[in-house]
Structures are given as structure tokens and as C-alpha cells.
Amino acid sequence: MNAAAFSFDGARVLVTGGTSGIGHAIAGGFASSGAEVIITGTRSDASEYEADLDAFGYRQLDLGDPSSIDALVDSLDALDVLINNAGVNLPGGLDEWAPDGFAASVGLNLIGPMRLTVGCRRLLFASNLEGGASVVNMASMTAYRATPIVPGYGAAKAGVVALTSSLANRWASRGVRINAIAPGVIDTPMTAPMAAFPELLDGELAHIPMRRLGRPDEIVGAALFLSSGIASYITGHTLAVDGGYLAS
């Protein structure tokens, strides 16, 4: 089997939304590579989740609450890699075409991650990680294509792409690289509801030349690569991992 191995021995990594799906897979990838990994979730304790989270430290985080974000930052004493993975569409069941729903989605998916990233800046600036400290933001195909169901989420993810470029420019002199991953349609709890709407799922599959959903583990390599010293000259880039979605 051909495979790449990464070493993050001793690196301190924070993965938001690491209790399931893509975030859980990425957190596991870093832990298997030797990193000390903290994940976040919205529940008060890791034991409230069905997934096995024993390999990670755990912090509660509500990205819609500035005080929760600030408390997370204050709880950290060092950080080398930040993975801004946590996100949600239709927050609280709100209609994203209504102003309140749109604002809530942008707040959770763009403003919250921005506040967390900026809050962690001193820890990232102090990192001695080979290749520099890294932030990897999670974008989406909705940043590039119209999304009639979740316009707030799409607008937020387009903002994530722009924020990635802006932060990369601002922090390059401080030795911190900022990149993003734009996953295609990945088989996760967030996309599971599409199974109840075959016309929606079939429409998405028709846009994917590989004609299948991606798996969370297929995002892990991109996150490890972008955070590693091998990618030391890559910053401000958004990497699509999409089965060819953008090519269709």
C-alpha cells in the first residue's frame, strides 16, 4: 500500500468540532502522528458523546458565544496547529433566507472561527513547529456554487476562503501559515439528511465526476499535509478535496 506518514510528535493541536465526521477523523490523524490533540464540542463533557474520544483532550465550545470562545483561548497554554472545522447549517432550525437565520449561520461559520483564530495568535506566533504554526480552515463547495437552501452557510464559507487569504498575508511575517480545505460532499452526520431527499442527493452526485460521496478519512491527509513542514511554502491556499466537483 502506498501511503504517506507524518510526524507531529509533541505538537499541540486544536480541532474544533472534533466529536464526529471530518473533525473526528482529522483529530485521530494528528493523534496517530504523535500530536497532543484537544477537540471541542457543544456538550459539557466528552462522555456525553457516543464516539470514542479518549485519545483527546476536550473543551466545550459555542462558536456563537464570544465568551465561550475567549474561555477556550484562555484555557490553552500552547498551540501549534488550529483546525477550524466546527460548523453548522440551518442553526437551531432557522431559515437562512430570513435575516436572523442568515446572521446566525454567518456568526457560527465565519465570525466565530475568526474570533478564535485571532484569539490564538500569540500562541501561534510562539510556536516552534517545523515549517511554522498552521491554521487550517474548513471551507466548502458552497463557497463556489449557489446554494438555495443554506445561503448563510454558503456566504460564510465564501468568507472563510477570503479570510484565509487575508490572514495568510497578515501573518506570513510571523511564521504562521493559513490555508483552507474545501471538502466536496462528504458522508458525515451533516450531510446524512440528504438521504431522505433522493432528488437532492442524486443532483449532488451528478456534479461529482467520481460519482460517490467522499469519506471523512479522505480529508485527513490534506489537513496533515497543509500543517506539516512539507508545506512550508504554502499559505493562503484553499485546497479542494471534492472528487472533481469543481471540475463539473
Image (tube, rainbow, N blue to C red):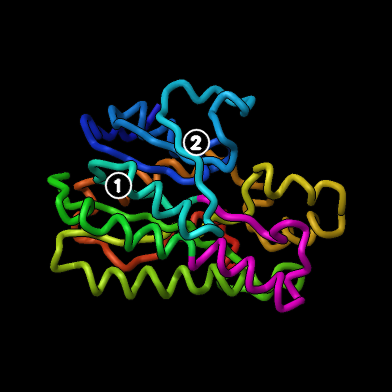
Foreground: 195 or 211?
Answer: 195
Q: Dividing the image into 4 quarters, which one contains the C terminus?
A: bottom right
- Residue 64 x/y as whole percent: 56, 59
Q: Residue at x 17, y 56 (%)?
A: 125
Q: Residue at x 47, y 60 (%)?
A: 66
- Residue 96 x/y as whole percent: 73, 71
Per the image, the residue denoted by label 2 is 25
Foreground: 75 or 111?
Answer: 75
Q: Give the mark count.
A: 2
Label at residue 59: none
Q: Dividing the image into 4 quarters, which one contains the N terminus?
A: top left
The secondary structure making up most of the magenta span is helix
- Residue 139 x/y as whole percent: 50, 62
Q: Residue at x 27, y 38 (%)?
A: 12
- Left/right placement of residue 86 relative to residue 77 reads right
- Residue 107 in magenta? yes
Q: Element under label 1?
A: strand
Q: Amino acid at mark 1?
A: Val
Q: Residues within 10 Å of mark 1 (few under 14, many from 20)?
A: many
**Gap in angstroms between the C-alphas marked 2 and 1:** 15 Å
Q: Amino acid at mark 2?
A: Ala
- Residue 73 in magenta? no
Q: Residues within 10 Å of mark 2 (few under 14, many from 20)?
A: some
- Earlier along the polypeptide chain: callout 2 or callout 1? 2
Label at residue 81: 1
Residue farthest along the bottom direction in this orientation: 99
- Residue 70 x/y as whole percent: 39, 54
Part of the protein shown in magenta? 86-111
The answer to which image quadrant residue 243 occupies is bottom right
The answer to which image quadrant residue 88 occupies is bottom right
* Mark 2 vs mark 1: in front: 1
Q: Element under label 2?
A: helix
